[in-house]
Every structure is written in C-alpha cells, then in structure tokens.
Image (cartoon, helix red, strand yellow):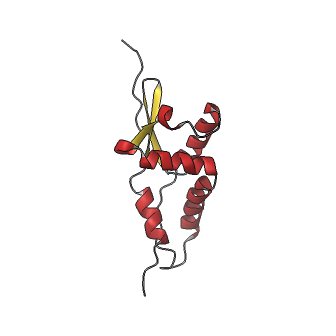
Amino acid sequence: MSNAKVLPLLEPQVVPCCPPLNERPLTQEEAVRTAAMFKALGDPVRLRLFSAVASHQGGEACVCDISDVGVSQPTVSHHLKKLREAGLLSSERRGTWVYYRVEPSVVAAMGQMLHHSAA
C-alpha cells in the first residue's frame, strides 16, 4: 500500500473574467488578467499542452499522457506551471502523477471575450 496522498486542487492565481472586447474598454485589472492568459498561450509548447488537456477524453489529462511535445520533462513541468499560474489549468496529484484539467470557465470566457456581438 502506498503512503502517497491526494492533494487538493491548486487554486489558480488569475481568474479569467472579462467582458467582450467590443462591449467596453477593459479596466486595468481585467487587462492584466487577460494579458496573463494570452501570454501563457503565446508559447507554442504551452498552447500544445493546453490543447492536449482541453481535448483529452474525460476533460482531464495525466502529465504522463501529454508530455510528448518535443521538450524535456522538466520543461513540460515549467510550461504547465505557467499555465496554472495564468489560471488556465488546475491540477491534482494522485499518487506519483499529476492530473490537469482546463478551468471550466476558461474556454467559455475566452470565447465570450473574443465574440463580436452585432450592435
């Protein structure tokens, strides 16, 4: 029997919550949050990792299933940490593996923010 323990989900440091860009100018706080999200996705490796998690069956992925992105495992961990810090992913340790999932509101919030509403 293992003495490993399950850690609770890590809370993201940034919560995506911004109105559509054509609705009104962003506040300073909204702009900082939004820039952090897009900056995190501005790296091709991070974008591939985010996509791998978002499209994984069941809505979550073990790091062991998504680490084949052409960089070393420590680099994968670094990029996943950046995605967590930007509020794009949450994680949970189960035994020796860490499982990642896209924060439920992230994709919807990003899509809503970029949605152009007819005026």
The quadrant holding residue 29 is bottom right
Q: Residue furthest bottom?
A: 119
Please indicate, yes or no, whether residue 11 appears anywhere in the rendered image: no
The picture places residue 37, in percent across and down from the top left corner, at 56, 57
- Residue occupying the point 43% across, 69% down: 112
The picture places residue 4, in percent across and down from the top left corner, at 42, 20
Quadrant where the C terminus lies? Answer: bottom left
Quadrant where the N terminus lies? Answer: top left
The quadrant holding residue 107 is bottom left
Q: Residue furthest top?
A: 1
The picture places residue 61, in percent across and down from the top left corner, at 43, 39
- Vertical arrangement, residue 14 with respect to residue 24, above or below: above
- Residue occupying the point 48% across, 45% down: 52
- Vertical arrangement, residue 24 with respect to residue 54, above or below: below
Q: Nearer the viewer, residue 81 or 41?
A: 41
The quadrant holding residue 69 is top right
